[in-house]
DNA sequence: TACAAATGTAAAGAAAACTTTACATAGCGG
DNA sequence: CCGCTATGTAAAGTTTTCTTTACATTTGTA
């Protein structure tokens, strides 16, 4: 799965830490998701969507390997 | 988090087993998600969205407790 | 009623998400 | 150059997701 978190975060002018705090996770969690180290839960995806003001589909999309 | 999987599954006329097979998980996984026994991963949410032909936001929404 | 399909659920175990702590590196303004 | 902010990442540990197996219950229908 690919994601555009880093881009949307730049658009909203938020640091990883600010985004993490806003949605209640650790900064490493944000970093790990951005770097595709793991797949977030749907609750997290919805919170990211809300905070970054884009749909889940604008943030995440499936790849052929998924 | 609440979900409308059971409803969308009825609209698409799919059993839990058929939906599970379509997206590559066990039937119990579908049942457990429908019953809010656990929160699915974002990959799963996107696959459900695709198979059920609705957006992730139509399938899942945050509650105040999330 | 009897059978079959669909669903609920439980338990044990594997795999993955997520936290905390910690340290390293890169970039930028003084 | 120095200090600060932002980011990368690793390791250990906890929690949660998800699978497999298995059995019970419900519901439709012949």
Image: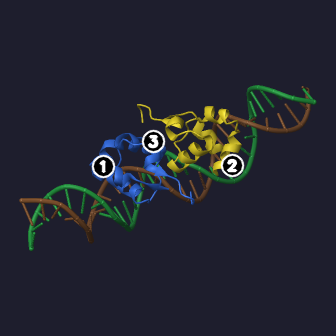
Chain colours: A yellow, B blue, C green, D brown
Chain letter, disc 3 residue: B
Residue mark closest to the camera, 1 vs 3? 1
Q: Mark 2 points at which residue?
A: A21
Same chain, labels 3 and 2: no
Q: Name the residue under label 3.
A: B43
Pointer 1 and pointer 3 on the same chain: yes
- Between C14 and B42, the one nearer to me in the picture: B42
Specify the quadrant of the image occupied by residue C24: top right
Residue C19 spot, x, y in % from top left: 64, 53
Residue B22 in the image: x percent, y percent?
Answer: 31, 42
Q: Does residue B35 show up? A: yes
Side of C1 relative to B60 (left or right): left
Q: Mark 1 lies on which chain?
A: B
Q: Mark 1 points at which residue?
A: B11
Where in the figure is residue C16, as x and y percent of width and height?
49, 45
Side of A18 relative to B56 (left or right): right
Q: Which residue is drawn at 47% across and 46% down?
A: B57
Q: What element carries label 2?
A: helix
Foreground mark, 1 or 2, reads 1
**Is C2 located above or below residue B59 in the figure?**
below
Viewer-nearest residue: A28 or B3: B3
Chain on which label 2 sits: A
Task: First in sequence, mark 1 or 3: give its number.
Answer: 1
What distance separates the C-alpha of mark 1 from that of mark 3? 22 Å
Q: Quadrant of residue A38?
A: top right
What residue is drawn where x is 27% and y is 49%? B14
Badge 3 density bin: few <14, some 14–19, many ≥20, Cα 10 Å: many
Q: In the rendering, at what x and y percent does residue D26 appear?
A: 26, 68
Quadrant in the picture for the C terminus of chain A? top left
Q: Do the residues labelled 3 and 2 touch (CB within 8 Å)?
A: no
Do the residues indicated by labels 1 and 2 lie within the same chain of the protein?
Answer: no
- Using residue B27 as the reference point, say whether residue A52 is left or right of it: right
């Amino acid at each position: 799965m690919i994601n555009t978190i880093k881009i949307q975060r730049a658009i909203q002018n938020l640091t990883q830490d600010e985004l993490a705090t806003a949605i209640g996770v650790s900064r490493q969690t944000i970093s790990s998701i951005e770097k595709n180290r793991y797949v977030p839960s749907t609750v997290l995806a919805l919170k990211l969507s809300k905070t970054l003001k884009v749909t889940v589909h604008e943030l995440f999309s499936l790849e052929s390997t998924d």
